[in-house]
Image (cartoon, grey):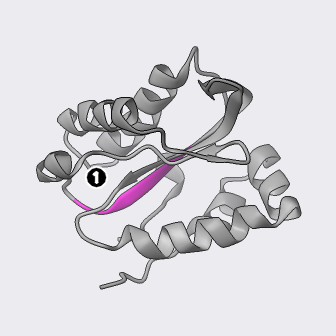
Amino acid sequence: MPIISKDRITLQTQAADKTAAIKQAGELLVRSGCVKPEYIEGMLTREQSMSTSLGNGVAIPHGMQESREYILQTGISVLQLTDGVEWDEGDKVFLVIGIAATSNEHVGVLANLAEVIEDENNLAELLHTTDPEVIIKYLGVSAPVE
């Protein structure tokens, strides 16, 4: 199973706030069978303890270690927010990448993501694309990292 698929990507959407954005990213993971609904609560708890914003308009909400029991399979979801939401004071996020990982499989995705968003052209493409295939092209690392 690929780590990302079209059914876990929502482009050009809105969220009222950070909590709503995290819930939407979590729901994509639930609907695609990656996590049980309880995992979303772990994502929200994690965010309360430490921000998952990477800067550059990108955040990577994910659950706590304790919420791993609710992960059925590793996967990521992507929410592209047209108007963005305030994540932390003065920090607006436009791309929310929800992560559910059973082990260290997400490490490859994070490494790839860090490399991708360093390039302003790649980041602009991710933030404005209307084609889910573009998201998959940049974030579709499927090889597990042990």
Task: Decide whether residue 75 is among the magenta residues.
Answer: yes
**Residue 131 appears at what percent x and percent y?**
73, 52
Q: Depth check: 61 or 8 in front?
A: 61
Amino acid type of disc 1? Cys
Q: Could you tell me which quadrant the C terminus lies in?
A: bottom left
Residue 130 visible at all: no
Q: Could you tell me which quadrant the N terminus lies in?
A: bottom left
Magenta-highlighted stretch: main secondary structure?
strand
**34 to 93, vertically: above or below:** below
Provide the residue designation for mark 1: 34
Q: Residue at x 30, y 61 (%)?
A: 101
**Residue 51 appears at what percent x and percent y?**
47, 38
**48 to 55, vertically: above or below:** above
Q: Say left or right for 104 vs 138.
A: left
Q: Residue at x 47, y 76 (%)?
A: 108
Q: Could you say whether the residue bearing mark 1 is in a helix, strand or loop?
A: loop
Location of residue 104 by image quarter:
bottom left
- In this view, the residue farthest toward the top is 16
**Residue 142 appears at what percent x and percent y?**
45, 77
Give the residues drawn in magenta, as a range: 73-78
**Residue 27 appears at what percent x and percent y?**
37, 34
Q: Say left or right for 6 vs 38.
A: right
Q: Say left or right for 138 vs 49.
A: right
Q: Depth check: 8 or 121 in front?
A: 121
Residue 19 visible at all: yes
